[in-house]
Amino acid sequence: MSTQARIPSLDLSGPVEALWPELLGAVEKVLRSAHYILGPEVAAFEEEVARFLGTRHAVSCNSGTDALVLALRAVGVGPGDEVITTPFTFFATPEAVSNVGARPVFVDIDPDTFNLDPRLVDAAVTSRTRAIIPVHLFGRPCDMAGVLGAAARHGLRVVEDCAQAFGARYHGKPVGTLGHAGCFSFFPTKNLSGFGDGGLLATDDEGLAQTARMLRVHGSRRKYHNEAVGCNSRLDELQAALLRVKLPRVAAWNEARVRAARNYQGLLGGDGLLVPPEISDGHVFNQYTVRMRSRSLDRDRVRARLGDEGIDTMVYYPVPCHRLKVYGQSHAEVICPEAELAASEVLSLPLWPGMDAEVQAQVASTLHRILREG
Ligand SMILES: *Cc1c(COP(=O)(O)O)cnc(C)c1O
């Protein structure tokens, strides 16, 4: 057993230490303002995110999950509708679809990108299909030309799940601005990470933004004059104030993630037993996810051995959504072999902005050795 400290899969302490006085100042300002819900910090944060993304509207809310629910409701998805999405995502994506009363319809992924394969959309469209949710998984933009093309052919709404991709770009354009709405999460592990839950919906559509704003405060535009059954889903003033401190740094942090990914690429690229992720344009590496090349390599065993050596890794995601217990019966007929294979082969290695190159080298050399032990 090594005496060195464990290597975590994610180290959130860097920005907290570096920005401590500013973060503390932001907290003090809010505490003294006695304005805690939908006040000036939320308004300023929404304006700053809209500017960062280049969208006309940004509507913050309680979580990325709620952003998806609000977006789906605002684009008119409801009971009886179908929404096409990927099975290789966090459960929140199809859960939002189910929570608005619609049915998630899973199409398989492109094994090279882990993202929804738009070539499979046409065959999945029925008379009930209303929308597509592409997910920019691990921070890698989905093939949006393909998604938008399919949406245009069938008259579908496009709600982007950008929870893992704040600041990612598709052909130079920020993700979340390509479809009708883009949904972001500020959960602590995301690229723009808060100190608790938080989310946001971005859109250029005025009506859609207004509907989302109305729904997040119990379906009211005017207090006590409720016009729809909405929810209570607001970003706190405290979170907004803290996120405002971090927002101006997120582009640099994303660049640091890409640098760390390039470094891994150099260390792991030559290892024939695994496939490192492609450093594609606009990718922001929320996760650095490799896959085992050989089916004879037991990913879970490799992961356990790394753990024994003090290296924490993650598996996003061990079970594709259509195979989760919750959808087991309703989606028993779904066939997505690429998603199932990916779920059994992926391993996300430690990565965070500013990660030490020596620590990365240690991860890589340990992984090389474990793979060769068989
Ligand atoms: C994190 C995440 C969500 C949900 O965001 P929360 O803020 O945790 O609700 C949705 N989709 C994906 C792909 C995610 O990674």
Image (cartoon, rainbow, N blue to C red):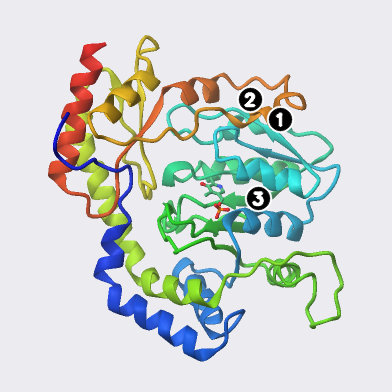
SS at mark 3?
Answer: strand
| Quadrant where the image shows the C terminus | top left
* Residue 58 pos. (x, y %): 58, 70
Give the CA separation, mark 3 to mark 1.
23 Å
* Residue labelled with disc 1: 327
Give the CA separation, mark 2 to mark 1.
7 Å
**Residue at left 68%, top 43%?**
95
Can you say whether 223 is above or below 261 in the image?
Answer: below
State the residue in front, 62 or 175.
62
Tell me the kind of residue under disc 2: Arg
SS at mark 2?
Answer: helix
Can you say whether 24 is above or below 71 in the image?
Answer: below
Count of marks overlaid on the render: 3
**Residue at left 24%, top 34%?**
310
**Mark 3 in CB contact with mark 1 (< 8 angstroms):** no
Quarter of the rendering containing residue 353: bottom left
* Residue 230 pos. (x, y %): 78, 65
**Residue at left 33%, top 63%?**
251
**Residue furthest to the bottom:** 33
| Quadrant where the image shows the N terminus | top left
Q: Residues within 10 Å of mark 1 (few under 14, many from 20)?
A: few
* Residue labelled with disc 2: 323
Q: How crowded is mark 2: few (under 14 residues within 10 Å), some or many (20 or more)?
A: some
Q: How crowded is mark 3: few (under 14 residues within 10 Å), some or many (20 or more)?
A: many
* Residue labelled with disc 3: 158
Q: Is mark 1 within 8 Å of ligand 1?
A: no
Can you say whether 153 is above or below 74 in the image?
Answer: above
* Residue 265 pos. (x, y %): 23, 35
